[in-house]
Amino acid sequence: MTPFSYSRPTSVADAVAALAEPGARLMGGGTNFVDLMRKGVEAPDHVVDVHGLPLGTIGEASGGGLRIGALVSNTALASDERVRRDYRMLSEALLSGATQQLRNRATTAGNVLQRTRCTYFMEPEYPCNKREPGSGCPAKTGFNRIHAILGESEHCIATHPSDMCVAMAALDATVHVTGSQGDREIPFVDFHLLPGDSPEAETVLRADDVITAITLPEASGASRNSVYVKVRDRQSYAFALVSVAAGIELDASGQIADVRIALGGVAHKPWRASGAEGLLRGSAPTEDAFREAGEAIVADANGYGHNDFKITLAPRTVALALNKALGLAQRATGDAR
């Protein structure tokens, strides 16, 4: 680990000002950032530790929904009664990630800003277009079991590792940031970037932006009747090969009034499947419809050898998640009747 200076601001404004220092980087819980510093992937000149800022509460959002402070721990968010009841997929996604000890320390904003677990990115002795633009992407011809099949580019096939972010994308969350140019609100689905020609740019954040909160819209049938299904190599402490956040709301005739689908482990960002959602809205919730929606999601997928299995696994996981969500929706409709 290279030497660095350290500060611990007591306000968001002070944190924004500290980020103006050349080579400054923000640190929340540090569960990902410190690991990357140890490996030499991250080498900040100055660390701005925001863990003490007053951003650690969950409250009501204006207009309904929830406002989640940037420093709310993953454990607190997953166990919040309102989240468990009204945004079930989010609680399940959080509990499927990491370990209890890490969830106690990890923060909401830090989870949003997780870096990829691509082996070639995590080990500085390998070239990597994300670490050093123009150096190459050995993952394309190397061991790429965990890598992307959707939205990838010739420069990068890394995946985003967060479970929480998949649910946030499906729920139409909003990211709130403060920077030297003022406050901004960013739709969650627009926050992370696909690699394109510049895989080193992972989000739309500016250099001195500080995430202050995430808001969830008012709960709906699709957010309540929702699940998170994660397929991985072992039962715990493993990143997703494919994951799906799905929710369904039925109308009075039993047709699909609303549906939410987002995938993890398949792309450089949480992959919101808006096209598949459009196929399902207004239709009957059948096995064939769920299968066809899953197949539509991977219609343009590309495999790179070791990850070819994801093209088959992804639609099957989508169908499984939708079936689970349908069960919740039918039970809710039955209760209502």
Image: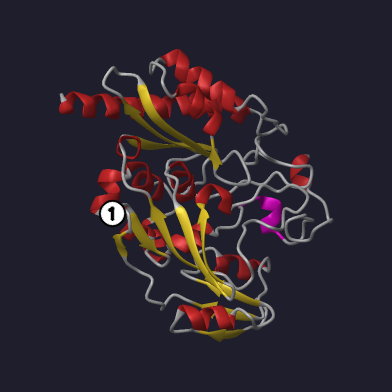
Read off the residue under disc 1: 79
Q: Residue at x 44, y 82 (%)?
A: 11
| Residue 96 x/y as whole percent | 40, 46
| Residue 111 x/y as whole percent | 48, 58
Q: Is residue 307 above or below residue 57?
A: above
Magenta residues, start to end: 117-123
| Residue 171 x/y as whole percent | 42, 44
**Which image quarter holds the C terminus?**
top left
Quarter-of-image position of residue 201: bottom right
| Magenta span includes 121 | yes
Q: Is residue 270 above or below residue 293?
A: below
Observer-nearest of 255 and 83: 255
- Horizontally, is 58 left or right of 195 in the view? left
Q: Is residue 142 above or below residue 308?
A: below
- Horizontally, is 117 left or right of 74 in the view? right
- Horizontally, is 22 left or right of 135 in the view? left
Q: Is residue 162 above or below residue 180?
A: above
Q: Residue at x 63, y 83 (%)?
A: 4
Quarter-of-image position of residue 167: top left
Q: What amino acid does circle 1 point to?
A: Ser
Q: Secondary structure at mark 1?
A: helix
| Magenta span includes 285 | no
Observer-nearest of 290 and 314: 290
| Residue 189 x/y as whole percent | 54, 47
Q: Residue at x 77, y 54 (%)?
A: 129
* Residue at the farthest front position: 63
Report how many numbered discs are placed on residues in the image: 1
Q: Residues within 10 Å of mark 1 (few under 14, many from 20)?
A: some
**Which image quarter holds the N terminus?**
bottom right
